[in-house]
Amino acid sequence: MKLSEQTEKLNRYLEALRKRFETSEAPNDRKDRDFFNMVKKETAPIYDLLESWEKDALAAVKDRKASVHPSQIQSTKENMELLLMHSYYLDVRRKRYIELYTSIRYVFDLLLDTITDNFSDKS
């Protein structure tokens, strides 16, 4: 899967997670094994995609195919991991959640813009 496709897919996950955060109820028992297993099952594909996205994004930055700083890629991955858990456990204030969301969204959009610009320059 190309980096742009990975980024767009992560963007869709990001939107779904935000909706989940805004519409879901917090779990009754944070230590509920069934809830933990459900979260693990639902988030595993996102974590896997995030791992390959980070590797591909850092490679694109190294090859100067994207105008994003490597620390932005690493921070975005870490922020997305935080946001994933906050989306299910609802253990952070809305303001902090939106700050994480906005930061992630900014880097995803910046990456997509610079990738698109680089490819259109070569055509």
Image (spheres, rainbow, N blue to C red):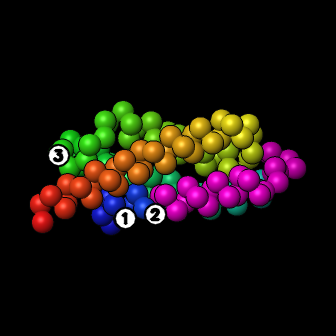
Residue situated in front as seen by the camera: 98 or 34:
98
Residue 68 horizontal/vertical position (percent): 31, 40
Element class at badge 3:
loop
In magenta segment, residue 104? no
Q: Residue at x 38, y 53 (%)?
A: 53
- Badge 1 marks a residue whose secondary structure is helix
Q: Is residue 58 left or right of residue 18?
A: left
In the image, what residue occupies the spot 67% across and 44% down?
86
What residue occupies the far right of the structure in this picture? Answer: 28
N-terminal of the pair, mark 3 or mark 2, is 2
Check residue 66 in the rendering and tell me which mark sits there, or answer none: none
Using the rendered view, name the quadrant where residue 49 is placed: bottom left
Mark 2, Cα crowd under 10 Å, few <14 / some 14-19 / many 20+, is: some
Whether tag 3 and tag 1 are in contact, CB under 8 A, the answer is: no
- Residue name at image x 36 percent, y 33 percent: 71
Image location of residue 64, percent across then percent down: 18, 44
Considering depth in this image, is 104 or 35 the residue closer to the camera?
Answer: 104
Q: Point out the stretch of residues depicted in magenta.
A: 10-32
- Residue 63, disc: 3
Q: Position of residue 18 (x, y in %)?
A: 64, 54
Confirm or deny contact between disc 3 and disc 2 (CB under 8 A). no
- Kindly identify which numbered label has been placed on residue 5: 1
Compare marks 3 and 1 and give the one earlier in the sequence: 1
